[in-house]
Image (cartoon, coloured by chain):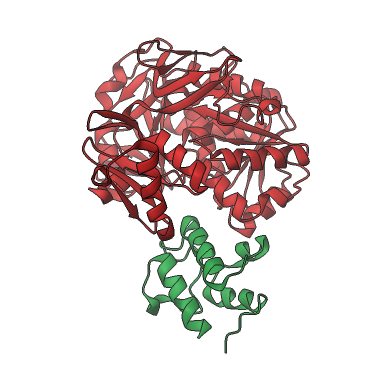
């Protein structure tokens, strides 16, 4: 297995990382900085290092140094609320913390590096490389355990279908503690390309200056990113250096897929609609860009070296490949466990496949509710309503009540009528609610957990 | 009048008190004015003044004072 983090000397003076402030670092400098850190934190046993990550060079150095050391690294949002962070630290007791935090069990050995005063006494399974949370902001203690092979294999698959080359300059505009963000870094470093790091939002001038000045060849986004890009007129920007752009992290509306596919064809760029889960490091499938207009709404085909099937009984999408996680962890005790999934991931998504072998997500297994014995797919309802309304709506519910949420007051009556027409539901079985600010996660996705709490 | 109208749009979109909306109020200086709120603010300005802000103006709209300056281009006057 080609583990890219052991290979940086090969690329020497090529640029590995460019920061927003404009400073560039070569692969040789990156390797030297990694070694400098390794000397400070090396131990005779395998340890866990917690990184409170931002999109800056020093955190990339730390992440790669830990991988190269064969230690395990946990990436957490640097902006995570203090008490949630303390709970994570107490539950996992990392040997070192890289970032800005105070904790009574830790002493600072230099600016930005803390060491646990009493060395942790627990075992970590040899293959455990990276721990990522599946939710960036809630501070859940549940982490996905990825192996060295998971990371390397997924980086290789991604770089193949995106046709990454050494002269690519991939923009990392998603947080690196988010699986989609870190996968941009991994896939570019795998081929000796450059990554451009920014903490700025797509609605800031600095962001677009950075894209232009540093000649970014790609950018990435979740559905919310693409809704925002539409409003700021991305589809009119020529961006001569941009070779392709990718979308993952949830379902993008069919209307927006068309808009961006047409933009891509007009400016000779490629638009990749992709699907994945943190549990798969994270990429699982993609739509080849030349097929995008024929396969709108599809998650595409499995990535190179992966395989997708549908469970005949449940309709659940099953993924198999070398990038499937080892398992979950809830505290440090779970780090000793070995591989529990053996390369097979139950995605929890219900899917269908067409005659050409393209897969379509029909909903989450858990996003079903039963109203009067009627099995309702909340995602499907959203899709149906959006088709008619041409506006986003959000469904949450329990087994006795369905809530349809909109942020447009004027749509309320129309949604009621549609629900009665489409699903023959009695008015008492559902409520249409108007919420001005739809709750969102840090990555822009709808926070269904909070939305549901607001309704109940 | 437009001054007051814009003030309530800001307060509404950012979920803050009108008294907090002053000329120096700027993007990213309070937690309430993040990128998600910014897009809500832009949508609200578009709606209420019946205009469509250009790309540059959406990106430039970085403070309350700047918002007034930008809106003048769309023939919205502030005394």
Q: Tell me if I can see residue B17 in this picture.
A: yes
Q: Report whether A158 appears left or right of A103.
A: right
Is A389 situated above or below B19? above
**Picture quarter with the N terminus of chain A:** top right
The picture quadrant where one finds residue B12 is bottom left
Residue A342 percent across, percent down from the top left: 40, 9
**Residue drawn at x 38%, y 33% as measured from the top left:** A134
Q: Is residue A251 left or right of residue A126?
A: right
Residue A129 in which image quadrant: top left
Q: Is residue A231 left or right of residue A280?
A: right
Expressed as whole percent of the image width and height from the top left, the position of residue A320 reads: 47, 12
Identity of the residue furthest to the bottom in this view: B79
Report the chain shown in green. Answer: B
A158 is higher (above) or lower (below) than B61: above
Question: Between B5 and A181, which is closer to the camera in this rendering?
Answer: B5
> How many numbered circles are shown?
0
Pick whichever, A209 or A129, lies toward us: A209
Task: Pick the residue in front: A46 or A167.
Answer: A167
Residue A438 visible in the current orientation: no
Q: Residue at left 61%, top 63%?
A: B58
Residue A77 pos. (x, y %) = 41, 43
Q: x%, y% of residue A168?
A: 71, 33
Residue at x 69% of width, y 31% of height: A193
- The answer to which of A235 and A337 lies nearer the viewer is A235
Q: Is residue B64 left or right of residue A104?
A: right
Classify A209 as above or below B61.
above
Residue at 36% from the left image edge and 12% from the top image edge: A339
Q: Specify the chain shown as red.
A: A
């Amino acid at each position: 297995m080609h583990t890219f983090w052991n290979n940086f000397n090969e690329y020497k003076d090529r640029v590995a990382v460019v920061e927003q402030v404009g400073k560039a670092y070569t692969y040789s400098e990156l390797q030297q900085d990694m070694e400098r850190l390794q000397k400070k934190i090396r131990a005779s046993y395998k340890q866990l290092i917690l990184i409170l990550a931002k999109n800056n060079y020093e955190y990339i150095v730390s992440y790669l140094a830990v991988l190269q050391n064969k230690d395990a690294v946990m990436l957490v949002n640097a902006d995570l609320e203090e008490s949630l962070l303390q709970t994570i630290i107490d539950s996992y007791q990392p040997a070192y913390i890289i970032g800005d935090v105070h904790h009574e069990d830790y002493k600072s050995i230099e600016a930005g590096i803390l060491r646990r005063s009493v060395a942790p006494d627990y075992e970590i399974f040899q293959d455990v490389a990276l721990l990522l949370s599946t939710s960036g902001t809630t501070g859940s203690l549940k982490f996905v355990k990825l192996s060295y092979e998971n990371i390397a294999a997924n980086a290789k698959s991604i770089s193949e279908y995106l046709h990454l080359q050494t002269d690519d300059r991939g923009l990392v505009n998603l947080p690196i503690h988010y699986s989609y963000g870190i996968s941009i870094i991994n896939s570019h470093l795998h081929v000796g390309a450059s990554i451009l790091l920014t903490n700025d939002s797509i609605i800031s001038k600095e962001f677009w200056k950075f894209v232009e000045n540093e000649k970014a060849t790609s950018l990435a986004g979740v559905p919310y990113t693409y809704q925002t890009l539409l409003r700021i007129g991305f589809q009119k920007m020529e961006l001569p250096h941009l070779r392709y752009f990718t979308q993952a992290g949830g379902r993008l509306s069919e209307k927006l897929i068309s808009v961006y596919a047409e933009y891509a064809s007009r400016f000779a760029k490629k638009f990749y609609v992709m699907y994945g889960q943190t549990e798969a490091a994270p990429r699982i499938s993609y739509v080849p860009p030349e097929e995008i207009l024929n396969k709108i709404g599809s998650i595409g085909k499995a990535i190179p070296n992966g395989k997708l099937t549908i469970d005949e009984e449940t309709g659940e999408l099953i993924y198999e490949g070398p990038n499937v996680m080892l398992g979950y962890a809830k505290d440090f005790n779970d780090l000793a466990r070995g591989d529990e999934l053996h390369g097979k991931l139950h995605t929890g998504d219900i899917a269908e496949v067409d005659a050409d072998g393209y897969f379509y997500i029909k909903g989450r297994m858990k996003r079903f509710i039963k109203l009067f014995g009627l099995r309702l797919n909340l995602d499907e309802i959203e899709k149906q309503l959006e088709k008619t309304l041409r506006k986003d709506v959000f469904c949450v519910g329990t087994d006795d009540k369905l809530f349809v949420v909109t942020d447009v007051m004027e749509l309320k009556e129309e949604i009621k009528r549609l629900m009665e027409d489409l699903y023959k539901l009695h008015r008492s079985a559902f409520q249409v609610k108007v919420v001005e600010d739809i709750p969102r996660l840090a990555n822009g996705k709808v926070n269904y957990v909070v939305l549901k709490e607001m309704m109940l | 009048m437009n001054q007051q109208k814009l003030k309530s749009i800001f307060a509404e979109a950012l979920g803050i008190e009108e008294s907090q909306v002053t000329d120096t109020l700027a993007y990213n200086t309070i937690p309430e004015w993040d990128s998600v709120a910014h897009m809500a603010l832009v949508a609200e300005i578009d709606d209420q003044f019946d205009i469509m802000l250009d790309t540059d103006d959406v990106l430039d709209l970085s403070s309350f004072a700047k918002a007034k300056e930008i809106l003048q281009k769309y023939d919205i006057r502030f005394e």
